[in-house]
């Protein structure tokens, strides 16, 4: 047997063993697992897909989120109910945007729990972007505005939250940006998860 064929077989077996070990150890499998097979037959696994080539391989059904994820639950419920927005959606956006870090600042300048851009902060009159109540209140009002603008289409609303409403209107669908497409999927997954808690 040729050396290159043996190498492919060895690589495949190694990937299967490693993939299986991740699936068998619940404390290590703390996220959804994605995989793709490249043109050489090599299997790639990740919990953070960076390409559309990755397909969902195993969905994490265990709740392994740290207790800090519940820190803002009461505040999220209070503000969401005031604006008639599903609190699970708000929590899903916060998880995807800042992972519950009230001091988060993105490379583009988005700030706080809901990662509001400076122009959005100014428009919504949010003067304390790192104050959790002000940031969540501003983010919920922004979400409500987007839902109205996109006729309650959740996927388009989330795409607009990520890429901007003008971009979504330009394409009249989720823009063909990998980041935005992955963002929408991620938030919808979190939304499904949090709907069972809130």
Image (cartoon, grey):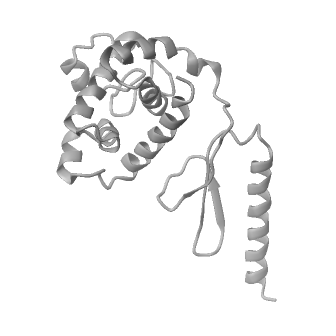
Residue 198 at x, y percent in the picture? 52, 22
Say if 58 sits above or below 147 in the image: below
Name the residue: 79% across, 72% down: 10
Residue 54: image location, x then y, percent: 54, 58
Estimate the x, y position of residue 71 in percent, counting from the top left.
Answer: 55, 14
Residue 149 drawn above or below residue 37: above
Total numbered labels placed on residues in the image: 0
In the visual, does 91 lie left or right of 128?
right
Can you say which quadrant of the picture contains the N terminus?
Answer: bottom right
- Residue 131 visible, this angle: no
Spot occupied by residue 117 in the image (x, y as percentages of width and height): 29, 27
Q: Residue furthest bottom?
A: 1
Quarter residue 25 falls in: top right
Q: Residue at x 45, y 11 (%)?
A: 75
Location of residue 189 with respect to 129 vertically, above or below: below
Which residue is rendered at x = 42% and y = 22% of the image? 113
Task: In this rendered view, identify the residue nearer to me: 160 or 189.
Answer: 189
* Side (left or right) of 18 relative to 141: right
Who is closer to the viewer here, 2 or 176? 176
Residue at horizontal 74 percent and vertical 62 percent from the top = 15
């Amino acid at each position: 047997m040729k050396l290159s064929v043996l190498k492919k077989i060895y690589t495949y077996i190694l990937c299967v063993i490693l993939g299986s070990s991740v699936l068998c150890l619940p404390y290590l499998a703390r996220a959804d697992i994605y995989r793709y097979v490249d043109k050489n037959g090599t299997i790639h696994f990740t919990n953070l897909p960076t390409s559309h080539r990755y397909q969902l391989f195993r969905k994490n059904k265990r709740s392994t989120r740290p207790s800090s994820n519940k820190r803002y639950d009461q505040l999220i419920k209070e503000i969401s109910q005031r604006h008639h927005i599903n609190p699970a959606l708000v929590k899903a956006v916060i998880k995807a945007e800042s992972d519950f870090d009230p001091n988060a600042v993105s490379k583009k300048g988005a700030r706080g729990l809901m990662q509001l851009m400076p122009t959005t902060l100014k428009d919504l009159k949010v003067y304390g972007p790192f104050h959790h109540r002000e940031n969540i209140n501003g983010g919920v009002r922004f979400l409500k505005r987007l839902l109205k603008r996109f006729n309650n289409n959740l996927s388009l609303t989330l795409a607009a939250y990520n890429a901007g409403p003008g971009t979504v209107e330009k394409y009249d669908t989720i823009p063909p940006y990998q980041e935005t497409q992955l963002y929408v999927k991620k938030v919808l997954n979190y939304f499904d998860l949090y709907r069972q808690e809130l």
